[in-house]
Image: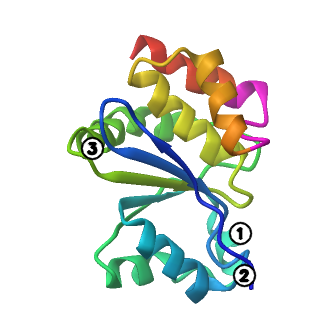
Amino acid sequence: MTTFPIATFDLREGGRIGVCPLPGRVGGLEADLKSIVAWQPAVVLSMTEWGEMKAIGSDVLGARLQDHGIDWVHFPIHDFGGPLGADREAWPGLAVRLHGLLDTGHGVLFHCRAGQGRAGMMALRVMVERGADPDAALVGLRRKRPGAVETREQFTWAAEGRSS
């Protein structure tokens, strides 16, 4: 049996961030869901597009998480890309919510299909918004989640959090 990989980053200011692949992609949705529930996130953010989720039967993920009392946010981003248009505009409001959860010691879990590019970008953005140096935070992120933040576009968007 394959263990569902969740790279965990305990934040100095409190709370923790997790980065993982699309639940259902590693050990089946129910097995992966058990690992997520055990990790105890307050919220799971899905950066996968609907078609990616549906292709492996993970289109029920949001409902299954909510069955376990875990909030779910679908924030789809095209593979290898960053937030565009309305998503860029929606981020500040979502970020306030995430930082509030982290400030009170909760966990925030990000996933995309492979658990690298989009999920890594979002984790890096939150770390940068919390005061981390983008380059140093990326090194730490990749130490635990090799391949995190796959494109220049993703790094640039995450690093913009420094001015937020």
Rendered image quadrant of residue 146: top right
Which residue was labeled with disc 1?
52
User: Is residue 100 toward the left or the right of residue 98 in the image?
Assistant: left
Query: Is 119 above or below relative to 163?
Result: below
Q: Residue furthest top?
A: 163
Which residue was labeled with disc 2?
56
For the residues bearing labels 2 and 3, Cβ distance under 8 angstroms = no
**Residue 157 seen in the figure:** yes
Q: Which mark is residue 110?
A: none
Stretch of the chain drawn in magenta: 146-154
Question: In the structure shown, which secondary structural element does the residue marked by tag 3 occupy?
Answer: helix
Residue at x 79% of width, y 41% of height:
147
Color style of the picture: rainbow
**Could you classify mark 3 by the number of other residues whose Cα lies within 10 Å: few (under 14), some (14-19), or many (20 or more)?**
few
**Could you classify mark 1 by the number of other residues whose Cα lies within 10 Å: few (under 14), some (14-19), or many (20 or more)?**
some
Question: In the structure shown, which secondary structural element does the residue marked by tag 2 occupy?
Answer: loop
Whole-percent x, y for residue 93 in the image? 30, 38
Rendered image quadrant of residue 90: top left
Residue at x 69% of width, y 71% of height:
51
User: Is residue 158 toward the left or the right of residue 65 in the image?
Assistant: right
Whole-percent x, y for residue 104 in the image? 20, 44
Q: Mark 1 or mark 3, which is nearer the start of the sequence?
A: 1
Q: Quadrant of the C terminus?
A: top left
Residue nearer the viewer, 133 or 43: 133
Magenta stretch holds residue 98: no
For the residues bearing labels 1 and 2, Cβ distance under 8 angstroms = yes
Query: Is 151 above or below relative to 98?
Result: above
Q: Which amino acid type corresponds to the residue marked 1 in the rendered image?
A: Glu
Which residue was labeled with disc 3?
97
Q: Quadrant of the N terminus?
A: bottom right
